Image (tube, grey):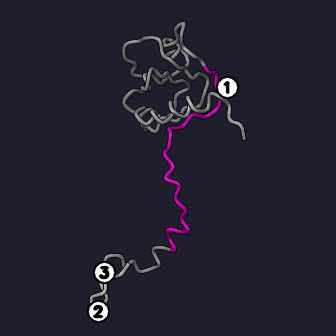
Amino acid sequence: MKLHPLVRPIAFALMLFAGISSIGCRLGPKGDADLVLLGGNVVTMDPSFPRASAVAIKGDRLVAAGTDRQVRAWVGEGTRVIELAGKTVVPGMIDAHTHFVGIGARKLQVDAMGTTSSNGDKMG
């Protein structure tokens, strides 16, 4: 399956999204963002500010989240703007890629690594 070329930069931006709770609509000094996502359903994970429609990313930081109008202030000549058309944006997640059935099966077995037998032989 071929991915759209913007998937990686957006995924990177979303990984940074975990810090959204300290930003919310409370925007700092404005400046040209590198990437602005507009017109979306942005899940912030902040109970006091659960949803936004836009986010701005500058460098490796999420610099603003809020309404399209608020975040548009971060658009400059060099800003890449992506219209999300209602698509949902969620914080990035790191997948440890765990197979739960395998973990469960291992928990049913005795781990004897590092122990010794009754005759003193090292196990494992």
- What residue is disc 1 on? 85
Q: Secondary structure at mark 3?
A: loop
Say few, some or many: other residues with alpha carbon within 10 Å of mark 3 (under 14 / 14 to 19 / 20 or more). Answer: few
- Which residue: 48% across, 73% down? 106
Residue furthest bottom as drawn = 119
Seen in the picture, residue 29 relative to 108 is either above or below; the reply is: above
Range of residues picked out in magenta: 82-105
Q: Which residue is mark 3?
A: 115
Query: Residue at image x 49%, y 16%?
Result: 70
**Depth order, front residue of 123/93:** 123
**In the rendered structure, which amino acid carries the disc numbered 3?**
Thr
Mark 2 surroundings: few (<14), some (14-19) or many (≥20) residues within 10 A: few
- Residue at 50% x, 71% y is 104
Find disc 2 in the rendering and name its residue: 118
N-term mark: 1 or 3 = 1
Name which quarter of the figure residue 58 lies in. Answer: top left
- Image marks 1 and 3: residues in contact by CB distance under 8 Å: no
Which quadrant of the rendered structure holds the N terminus? top right
Do the CB atoms of the residues marked 1 and 2 lie less than 8 Å apart?
Answer: no
- Helix or strand or loop: what does disc 1 sit on? loop
- Residue flagged by tag 1: what amino acid is it? Ala
**Residue occupying the far left of the picture:** 120
**Magenta stretch holds residue 89:** yes
Percent across and percent down for residue 96 are 49, 53
Asked which quadrant contains residue 87, the reply is top right
The Cα–Cα distance between marks 1 and 3, rounded to whole angstroms, is 59 Å
Q: Which numbered dot is residue 17?
A: none
